[in-house]
Image (spheres, helix red, strand yellow):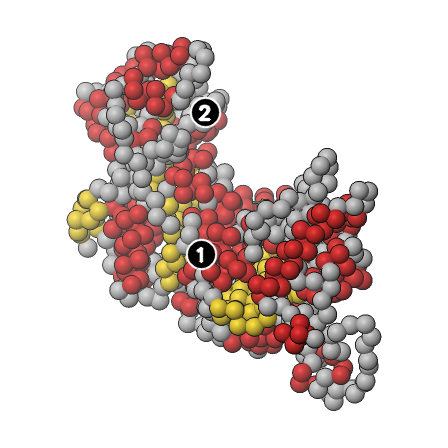
Amino acid sequence: MPAQQVKLYQIGTFAVGNRLLDAEQRTVQARMDRSNSLTSGHRACRGCGEALGARYVLDAAMRATGGQIVAANATGCLEVFSTPYPETSWQLPWLHSLFGNSPAVASGMAAALRAQGRRDVRVVGQAGDGGAVDIGLGCLSGMFERDDDVLFVCYDNEGYMNTGVQRSGATPPGARTATTRPLGAQPGNAFGQGKSLPLIAMAHEIPYVATATVADLHDLEAKVEHAMTLHGARYLHVLVPCPLGWGSASEDTVRVARLAKETGIFPVFEAEHGELTSVSRIRQRRPVEDYLILQSRFAHLFGEPRRDDIIARIQQQADRNIERFGLLDPRAQEA
Amino acid sequence: MLSQLEGSQATAKAVARCRPEVVAAYPISPQTHIVEALSDMVRLGELAPCEYLTVESEFGALSACIGASAMGSRTFTATSSQGLLFMAEALFNASGLGLPIVMTVANRAIGAPINIWNDHSDAMAMRDSGWIQLFAGSNQEAVDLHLQAFVLAERLGLPVMVCMDGFVLTHAVERIDLPTVEEVDAFVPRFEPRQLLDPAHPVSIGAMVGPEAFTEVKYLMHARQMQALDEAPSIAADFGDAFGRTSGGLMHSYRTEGADTVVLALGSQVGTIEVVVDDLREEGHAVGVVELVCFRPWPETEVRRALAGAERVLVIERAFAPGAGGILAADVRLALAGTGTEVFGVVAGLGGRPVTRSAIRELVDDVRAGRLAPEGTHFLGLRTDVVEHQLRRADGPRPGPHAESVLAELGIVGSGSH
Ligand SMILES: Cc1ncc(C[n+]2csc(CCOP(=O)(O)OP(=O)(O)O)c2C)c(N)n1
Ligand code: SF4
Ligand SMILES: [Mg+2]
């Protein structure tokens, strides 16, 4: 069927509208033959970034492999909202085992495929930040270190959302969660040392590590497609805003994700064998406040008294990311 | 073919001949020799096609087996003690998902205090994990049970633990009749998975199940376990036909005809008990022993049938439930409820303490002479002077740790641990 040529100009966003692109450059989602790996009817909240991210990731992986994908999933929102018995939204072979073991389950699948001599079928492991950054880290590190042929995807919504929005190792400082309520003198989650799983993955010097957000879906798909051209352990960390846990409007999911990148709070980059190979530059730098203010999990920073000290520390962290990853276009800096 | 082999080597060879496609394991004494041997065989190409995954933990080991099994490969792992506990969550998951993984448990005590020696606390702690649990009485039986375990697991779609006593069996060199590759191929059919992750026929495995159906799903697990009570003996019978020896099944009775007293036990200690039974029979005492092979599923009817004729049953077990008592004894008491047979529960051989021929003889004599109460739990060879002193000490201010204090009192300095 010839693609319909509709010219549509988008306003107030830097994303290139799908319909402005040549048919070949359009997202996998825009194709009639997309696999709909995570199909409609699931129970995710309106505006769920995780559902959006998973759909793009898996459809891109399916397209890259001609539909030869097997998925291992950790416990968490993605698992719960997709498979309320006896229904399932998965249109690919999919196994959920436990919260903390999906990388090891994926390794086992890859080992079985190797033993069976089936090179065509590829394995994708999936978990939330809790399942990857925290409880599954041991298994994930083992999978990296052995260089098992698995693409592991962490959908980072910065908290244990499935159990009611508690703090995880990926929860940012200052954020309110059910276990870091801004009570007494505490400004929400404490400032710790941080726990960047992409950097931890890079330290394993695996073939490919990338971060992405659901704001730039072309970029997300391209990274998945690239990852599927490689073999060995690959890691993709996708920032997926959670309207329920973050207290953001459900229609703002993409906007919040974009601001995470444009403020420098969430650096978007690629690395191969432990070396940074590309970064997605900030197009129009914004203060962290623009990002924080859209989310009620930071509302206490803007109340009475306003916590400018905390906001300034968060800004410092974003500035450090910008510096460290070279997130600003050097020409833009000169101007 | 007869050969002199260490129990672990024999087990590894038997497992290899069952052609697992994925082995994932994490080392822990006394399981190590088994997985080291399998690793060698994979590296040398003697076991092929097979992937040996050097995982980062026992939790990872069993999880990898879960993924591999669902992908349609025959999978194997082995562990002991702390390692089995570290797998706990994945154990219940593997059985709940109905994946026919076979695992050797080289039985070892559980800490604290850390102890590497043999008892059955590890397997007993996981008796409700939904795994079929078979106990080997000898290394020959360990070898044979592994063949039967793969058949049983895959026929029922359930994981099977083959328990063999750590060190006592795993590290003992004995004469073993090791089934040949051809014999194993003839006995263990190709793995035909009951459920499979296949891009051509996508299914979701491990969905969430609410109160509407959870009971039914769990009941089916139970029902399939119970089917093992028929399948295990039938597989053992096939095994007997193929190999000409008795191995496996639910239990072995030894000289129980007309016995007034029957000892019931699991694992390698049965060998010692049989010697005591021979002595007693020679002296004209009607004593026999039942070696339980299949502990889970619990063969209640068969246990009752095997024991009900006796006046008294003496359960000797290498594990107990603190605060409750004997585990096996409790099951036996239920099986014999209303039969009038008295059940004596004795805990023995904890943490590698030898259960000697003379101690068993003395115990049987005490039971038959009415010197042991049928109620409660008895601890064979317990140093009552030491525990009484420690209990008195415990009343004082900051009495300190028990284990170190007992060692000091007994004049024992240091004890190796891995
Ligand atoms: C061993 C274990 N501990 C705790 C839980 C409870 N639990 C289920 S999902 C979850 C949080 C999931 O968080 P994350 O991985 O970030 O996924 P999200 O729901 O946020 O997408 C927790 C704590 C569990 N299922 N298993
Ligand atoms: S709680 Fe958050 S992650 Fe979970 S379904 Fe809702 S929006 Fe998605
Ligand atoms: Mg999360």
Q: Position of residue B200 (x, y in %)?
A: 56, 72
Residue B258 numbered mark, or none: none
The residue under the point 31% across, 28% down is B349
Q: Is residue A250 left or right of residue A223?
A: right
Q: Quadrant of residue B187?
A: bottom left
Tell me the CA gap for discs 2 and 1: 36 Å
Q: Position of residue A182 (x, y in %)?
A: 73, 40
* Residue type for callout 2: Pro
Q: Secondary structure at mark 1?
A: helix
Q: Secondary structure at mark 2?
A: loop
Q: Is residue B180 visible?
A: yes
Q: Position of residue A44 (x, y in %)?
A: 73, 57
The residue under the point 57% across, 63% down is A324
Q: Quadrant of residue B281?
A: top left
The residue under label 1 is A142
A265 or B139, nearer to the observer: A265
B285 or A183, nearer to the observer: A183
Q: Quadrant of residue B44?
A: bottom left
Residue B322 numbered mark, or none: 2
B351 or B272, nearer to the observer: B351
User: Could you tell me which chain the residue with mark 2 belongs to?
Assistant: B
* Residue type for callout 1: Gly
Quadrant location of the N terminus of chain B in the rendered image:
bottom left
Nearer the camera: disc 2 or disc 1: 1
User: Which class describes the residues within 10 Å of circle 1: few (<14), some (14-19), or many (20+)?
Assistant: many
The residue under the point 49% across, 74% down is A230
Q: Is residue A75 visible?
A: no
Q: Is residue A142 left or right of residue A282?
A: left
